Image (tube, grey):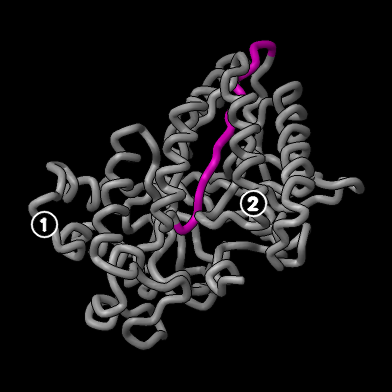
Amino acid sequence: MSRKIFALSFCLFPTLALAEPPSPGNEKNKQLVIVSFDGAHDNVLWEKSLVMAKRTGAHFSYFLSCTFLMTKADGKKGYQAPGQKPGRSNVGFAQNREEIAVRAGHIWRAHLEGHDIGSHACGHFDGRDWSEADWRQEFSSFRTALVDAWKKAGKPEAEPEGWAHFARTGITGFRAPYLSLSDGLMPAIKAFGFTYDASLVTKGPGWPTTEDGLPRFGLPLIPEGPSHRPVIGMDYNLFIRHSMGIENKKDSVRFEERTLEAYRNAFAREYGGERIPLQLGFHFVEMNGGAYWRALDRFLTETCSKPDVACVSYTEALPLIESARKKADSSAF
């Protein structure tokens, strides 16, 4: 069992966010399905996810950990997380420069194909005690790592035109590692120009809340399994639920079917009801023999083509949600 799996973002004791639906009236809004990936490192899974997106018509949000854009030697020279020694990372680094080049290529391809590249900070540390200055330091490290990715790959001549501008201004969303927050986070998020945060957890599918003008999204608790016990709609939490975090390929098909049923039921409730966006989270690790990625593929294949459904990134969801709110406001008069 890889130690990296245990360093991935998850939350067993959720922070609850209150939702305020737009009350759309007689005309229903589109049903939004928002799928995101934390870490965004494994190049095989980059390719797999992009193929899945093109086949199903979905757009994803990729929350990138920036230490995967540097080698360990690079990290020792140029990356230090708040309160950590230089070159420390909970999720590791790129193994070599060629790996960085391939990953940077996938990031650029995803950007060109309409996906959302967001920040998952750098070394995947728990920032619950971080100050605003600490978060700013980590965000600055992320931006520098992305700007310098092709140089770190040893291929500055291969850097696409527009990469530097994208790296400095195109990262508009954030999800905190471990979904762990502090009082210093929101001021730092606003200072760095992020347009949304996706670090919360909600009791069920919920509309984004607004804090000082910034939309904040939360992964929902959804009913799962024979007893329909709520679980956070993220692959890691299902991994914990199904096999206590121990890889179990033998029961992979059973876990896949349970997961798909949970996704279907959560979607059906919103699609036939208030049309609250359904958010689902994943990692670039195929836990329990790939059960959760297979369930996702099947779910998107049968869902994204339904009438009035939009499988979108967080960035794409924002104007659609704002439009729904304005429509609701106008119908109230």
Magenta range: 26-39
Q: Position of residue 114 (x, y in %)?
A: 36, 33
Residue located beneath label 1 in the image:
156
**Splitting the image into 4 quarters, where does residue 260 fall?**
top right
Question: SS of the residue at dot 2?
Answer: loop
**Splitting the image into 4 quarters, where does residue 299 fall?**
top right
Q: State the residue in front, 38 or 203.
A: 38
Q: State the residue in front, 154 or 196.
A: 154
The question of residue 25 being in magenta is answered with no
Residue drawn where x is 33% and y is 70% of the image = 95
Question: SS of the residue at dot 1?
Answer: helix
Tell me whether the residue at label 2 lies in contact with that at label 1, contact meaning CB atoms closer than 8 angstroms.
no
Q: Position of residue 148 (x, y in %)?
A: 19, 61
Image quarter in which the N terminus is found: bottom right
* Marked residue nearer the N-terminal end (2 or 1): 1
Q: Is residue 79 above or below residue 290?
A: below
For residue 234, the mark is 2
Residue furthest out toward the left: 157
Residue drawn where x is 64% and y is 12% of the image = 27
Foreground mark, 2 or 1, reads 1
Residue drawn where x is 24% and y is 51% of the image = 167
Q: Position of residue 201 (x, y in %)?
A: 65, 53
Visible in this render: residue 258? yes
Q: How far apart are the alpha carbons under marks 2 and 1?
A: 36 Å
| SS majority, magenta | strand
Question: Is 129 displayed left or right of 249 in the figure?
Answer: left
**Mark 2 packing: few (<14 Cα in 10 Å), some, or many (20+)?**
many
